[in-house]
Each structure stands twice: as C-alpha cells, then as structure tokens.
Image (cartoon, rainbow, N blue to C red):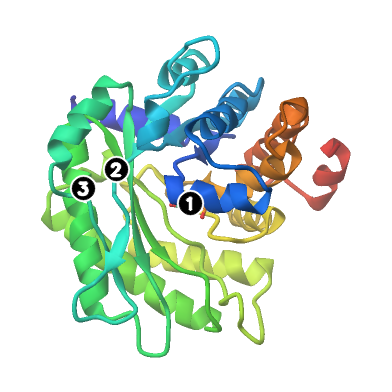
Amino acid sequence: MAANDLEATARALVAPGTGILAADESTSTIQKRFDKIGVESTEETRRAYRELLFTTEGAEEAISGVILYDETIRQSSADGTAFPKLLESKGIVPGIKVDIGAKPLANAEGETITEGLDGLRERLDEYRGLGARFTKWRAVITIGADIPSDYCIWANAHALARFAGLSQEAGLVPIVEPEVLMDGDHSIERSFHFTARTQHAVFTELHDQRVALEGMLLKPNMVLSGYEAPKRAGVQEVAETTLRCLKHTVPAAVPGIVFLSGGQTDEDATAHLNAMNAMGPHPWELSFSYGRALQAPALAAWGGEEANVAAAQEAYLHRARMNGLARSGTWSPEREQVTAR
Ligand code: 13P
C-alpha cells in the first residue's frame, strides 16, 4: 500500500468529531468485565456483546474505527455478516490488536515486555485478508519506587517500532500504544517525567526503524496524578501537563493522538479530552481510543440480558456522542444531563 493510503486511513481514524472504540479485550480481560456484571464468558456471550456494540445505530457519527480481538475479527452478527464487513458498511474502519500481551521482563522485577513479534508478518497478512486496515500494540510501563527502568522503556520502545514497521509494510496503519499506568501514588510531575521519557524513546526507535510518521497514530496515557496519590491534579492541570508533554515529544508529522482511558471514570476521560481540545488548535488531532470509558455504562445496562440490548446501546451511544463533543472542546457537564436517559 502506498504511503498516502496509510496517511488517508490514519486521517480517517481521527476525522473531526470522531474517535475509536477499543473493543479488543483479550479473552481473559473480557472475562473480568463480564465477572463484574455476573455474565458467563463464552464465545457466544462475547459475540452477542460485541454485536450489540457494532450494530448500535448512529454510533458511526462519533466512532471512526473499532479495534477488534483475534476471536472477534472472525465472528459475525446473528444474520451472518462478518463483523469487519458490518463495520465497513457503516463507514467504520475495522482494526486489530496484534500483540499477545505483556509478559515479565527478564532481570527486571515488576516490569513487563510486550510479546508478539514472532510470526507477526504472516499474521498481519491474514488480518488484512480478514478486513483489518489498522493495528494496535500496547506496551505497559509501571511507575513504582524504583521503576520504570530505562532498560524496560527502551526494550518496549524497540518492540513498538518493530511492530509499527511490519504493520506499514503490510499496508496497515499502526496505533503505537506506550501506556504509562495511572495506578500508584505518584505525583503528576512523576507521571510527566516517565511519560515524556517513554515517548522520547518510542519516537527515537520509530525514527531509527524508518517508520513513516504520517501513516501512524500514537495512543498514549494522559498525564495524571496516580490514582492513590494524596493530592490529585484537577482537570485543567491534567490537560495542561499532558499537552506540555506531547509538545515535547510528538512530531507534528503524526496525524493524530488517540488517548486510552486507563481506568479513569467515563466523565473524567471526556472532561480531560475536552479541556485539551478547548486549548487548541494543536499540531495533531487529539482524539480518543477508549475501551472502558466508552463501554462501562453499556456493560452495566446490558447485564447479559437480551431484553436490555436497546438500553445498553443507548448508553454506549451517549458516551460516544459525549466524546465526539470533546473532540472540539464543546462538551460540558450540562450536556451529560440533557442527553442522558
Ligand atoms: P482503556 O480505554 O480501557 O484503557 O482501553 C484502551 C485500550 O485499548 C488499552 O489497550
């Protein structure tokens, strides 16, 4: 695929007013989500839940793309339409998570390295045949007393760039996700320090490995105080600190930055994105690629019951629309009230 096709796909994924739904939970992660609502996780319940999300009418107004999991990209809606085809028919771009998870990093207690490079070239070809047009790889960096180490940061940055280069070779837009976790009691300054350090390493590796910045998206954490920090920064400080970090590290050639939600409340994830966009314009589109912050109310409303599908779809559509407003800085807490059920 030509470089300008990659760029066109990357730009479509960050089209104004829209963002990405991350529905690529691995089988063990979705099990945890289902456990919370008392639903057994089987291939069929996972399929039914994803169908509920993907068939939500009107979601395409605020959702540009959906990240699928290996099992999901091979599944179909009840009428037999393959999920990637169903999404394409609504103008939503299908994508796929291609890493196989974060595993303990040798000689680095408490730190992980994301695996999945072996055989990746062949898997990418298969995913492309199944309809994927973009990919995602998540690296995990933990802040603790003596971590993260530079060793962990650079090992993960190297793997992210390997993944990104192979994706572009296969004609797929890579979403490069270095997630510095928000768990812990660290200050917002400490999060800034390690997020900036991680992103510097990632862009150095991307450059050295000849990845076309125009044909990729960055999926970072926002810069927050740790969830257990004694004093937590408010919305404006989070927005300012996150922007300061991104301006230091992300070249303007990158078309878009699509944040993960990382365990923030739904409304915090929306408020932070909104505050950053209200401070624009910026060199890149600032958008979302949320998992939990788009799905939590829908999961709770569904509870595994067919009778609740419409209510769950309404809850999902509401969050999609609220984040769509945050793309232009036009969301406000009042908008939650007006459109809430
Ligand atoms: P959260 O928004 O729930 O953090 O998930 C996004 C994601 O895709 C993590 O890899």
Query: In the drawing, what numbered circle is on residue 98?
Result: 2
Q: Which residue sits at x=34%, y=79%?
A: 110
Q: CB atoms at circles 3 and 1 under 8 Å apart?
A: no
Q: What's the residue type where badge 1 is placed?
A: Thr
Q: Earlier in the sequence, mark 3 or mark 1?
A: 1
Q: Earlier in the sequence, mark 1 or mark 2?
A: 1
- Reply above or below: 97 against 265: above
Q: What's the residue type where badge 2 is placed?
A: Val
Q: Which residue sits at x=24%, y=67%?
A: 201
Mark 1, residues whose alpha carbon is within 10 Å: few (<14), some, or many (≥20)?
few
Q: Which residue sits at x=24%, y=80%?
A: 108
Q: Of circles 1 and 2, which is in front? A: 1
Q: CB atoms at circles 1 and 2 under 8 Å apart?
A: no
Q: CA gap, disc 1 to disc 2?
A: 15 Å
Name the residue carrying label 3. 163
Q: Which residue sits at x=20%, y=37%?
A: 168
Residue 200 position within the rendered picture, expressed as x and y whole percent measured from the top left: 28, 67
Q: CA gap, disc 3 to disc 1?
A: 22 Å
Q: CB atoms at circles 3 and 2 under 8 Å apart?
A: yes
Front residue of this view, candidates 27 and 52: 27
Query: In the drawing, what numbered circle is on residue 29?
Result: 1
Residue 133 position within the rendered picture, expressed as x and y whole percent measured from the top left: 32, 28
Q: What's the residue type where badge 3 is placed?
A: Phe
Image quadrant for the N terminus? top left
